[in-house]
Amino acid sequence: MTGVSRPPLEVGVRPTSFDRLFDEEYARVAAIARRVLGDPNAAEDVAQEVFLDLHRRFGDNPGAKAPAWARTAAAHTALNMIRSNRRRAGREERYATEPRLIDDPLVAVEAAETTRAVREALARIPRRQATLLALRYSGLSYAEMASALGIGVNAVGARLRRREARLRLVVCYASV
């Protein structure tokens, strides 16, 4: 799904830095969003939104920090989508007239509840903490996370442990 192809450039037109960045980073940005959201189609929407925003902000020559910016923006945008979806679901639930029927087996329900609880917890903790966790569980290395967040590589491990502990507390507190 992330094999997005752009129309060929006109004869004699050289690709811009943005074109090269898009080609190199689109799949990674979409993967980060997919890890946060759990929905490949929504992740594609997030990736497109990130690159549109990147181009609006920085133009055809976004600079050396653009890959890190795009990855961080993917996590932020995906988290914003979770928050937005949660608010919309709350509104829809308030106005729903019929109860939903659930036909899934117990294991699927438990897995869905765990996923929901983690996503809700991510939506409740501060954005920078949620971003760190989203980047880590998107498969980025400590060095890539440090670059994306503008912190030292040595600080990543300690911050990650604290954020994971905080997330566990938020998930446990929410389930009580």
Image (cartoon, rainbow, N blue to C red):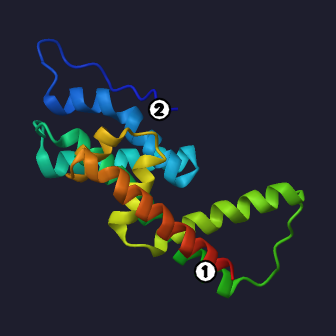
Picture coordinates of residue 145, whole percent (x, y) = 32, 45
* As drawn, 18 above or below 171: above
Residue lying at 22% horizontally and 20% vertically, measured from the top left = 9
Secondary structure under badge 2?
A: loop
Q: Determine whether, in the image, residue 110 is placed left or right of residue 122.
A: right
Picture coordinates of residue 166, whole percent (x, y) = 48, 70
Three-letter amino acid code at disc 2?
Answer: Thr
Picture coordinates of residue 103, whole percent (x, y) = 89, 61
The quadrant of the picture occupied by the C terminus is bottom right
User: Which of pointers 1 and 2 indicates the residue nearer the eye?
Assistant: 1
Picture coordinates of residue 137, whole percent (x, y) = 49, 47
What residue is shown with label 2?
2
- Tally of numbered tags: 2
Q: Residue 173 carries which label?
A: 1
Residue lying at 54% horizontally and 75% vertically, measured from the top left = 170
Label 2 Cα crowd, 10 Å radius (few <14 / some 14-19 / many 20+): some
In this orientation, which residue lies closer to the viewer: 45 or 8? Answer: 45
Q: Determine whether, in the image, residue 98 is placed left or right of residue 166.
A: right
Secondary structure under badge 1?
A: helix
Residue lying at 43% horizontally and 41% vertically, measured from the top left = 30
Three-letter amino acid code at disc 1?
Answer: Tyr
* As drawn, 107 above or below 176: above
Residue lying at 51% horizontally and 46% vertically, measured from the top left = 34
The CA span between labels 1 and 2 is 37 Å
Q: Residue 93 carries which label?
A: none
